Amino acid sequence: MQVQVYSSVNEVSSVQFANKTVVVIDVLRATSTIISALAAGASCITPVGTVVEAKAAHRPGDLLGGERFGRKITGFDLGNSPDEYCEDIVKNRRIIFTTTNGTRALHKAMRADCVLAAALLNASACAKAAAGQRKDIVLLCAGAHDQFAVEDGLCAGLLIKLIQSFSPAPIETDDLGAAMLGFYRDGASNVREVIASGVTGRKLLKMGLKKDLEACCQIDKLNAVPKLHGDCLTLEPASS
């Protein structure tokens, strides 16, 4: 089994995903929020690319969620903070969701055989689900401003470590995957500090969103794996 890593959403073409499992990573904060919302009981999440598309897709009973420039979009119900998506608000609701990078990455991945959403929050559950597909895996880091983001790379390294333990056969990684595995091993003892030192981490702290950063730095808090079915993300049944 091959595991490839791409450092940002613009680095790869969707045609390269054919017959593969793609794991989309946007730790700060899109995939962390998606995982949290579905774990809290949202019926599904529809990722869209633009604010206009989100408003067009909205139907009575839906929630609009997402961000631009790190802030909640004017007129939307929710922003991009995982803790906003609590059971009292999202249970049994469809969420139309758009973010700067994460939802673009999900759309680009749609040609893959299987698309999963990963973050630190669900690393073990998602790695197990990806390995269970028994196909070559692409770890697609959303990045920030079309550049590599340390938090996504750290998560990719952790996922590779976990996939190695779950895969029934040996795996091979590309050079970037090997580098990210080493990056995770070096930073495993101080994940929060590594992420807080990155560009997006520093930005969240300056915006007063320390709570979001800390929520997204928790490893294996949730046993929830969002999987794309058509244009909607729903939870995969938990594997034993």
Image: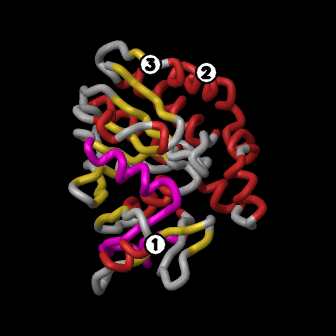
Is 200 situated left or right of 52 in this image?
Answer: right
In this rendered view, identify the residue nearer to me: 180 or 11: 11
Residue drawn at (43%, 35%) of the image: 139
Q: Are marks 1 and 3 in contact (CB under 8 Å)?
A: no
In this rendered view, identify the residue nearer to me: 189 or 148: 148
Q: Nearer the viewer, mark 2 or mark 3?
A: 3
Circle on res. 65: 1
- Residue 191 spot, x, y in % from top left: 67, 39
Name the residue that disc number 2 marks.
182
Q: What secondary structure is found at the residue carrying circle 3?
A: strand
Residue drawn at (54%, 72%) of the image: 79
Q: Residues within 10 Å of mark 1 (few under 14, many from 20)?
A: many
- Residue 235 spot, x, y in % from top left: 30, 54
- Residue 83 spot, x, y in % from top left: 55, 66
Q: Are marks 2 and 3 in contact (CB under 8 Å)?
A: no
* Quarter where residue 97 is shown: bottom left
The boundaries of the magenta stretch are 84-111
* Quarter where residue 1 is shown: top left
* In magenta stretch: residue 135: no
- Residue 150 spot, x, y in % from top left: 64, 39
Circle on res. 139: none
Marks 1 and 3 sit apart, C-alpha to C-alpha, by: 35 Å
Name the residue that disc number 3 marks.
173
- Could you tell me which quadrant the C terminus lies in? top left
Q: Earlier in the sequence, mark 1 or mark 3?
A: 1
Q: In the image, is residue 176 above or below residue 59? A: above
| Kind of residue at disc 2 | Gly
Q: Earlier in the sequence, mark 2 or mark 3?
A: 3
Q: Are marks 2 and 1 in contact (CB under 8 Å)?
A: no
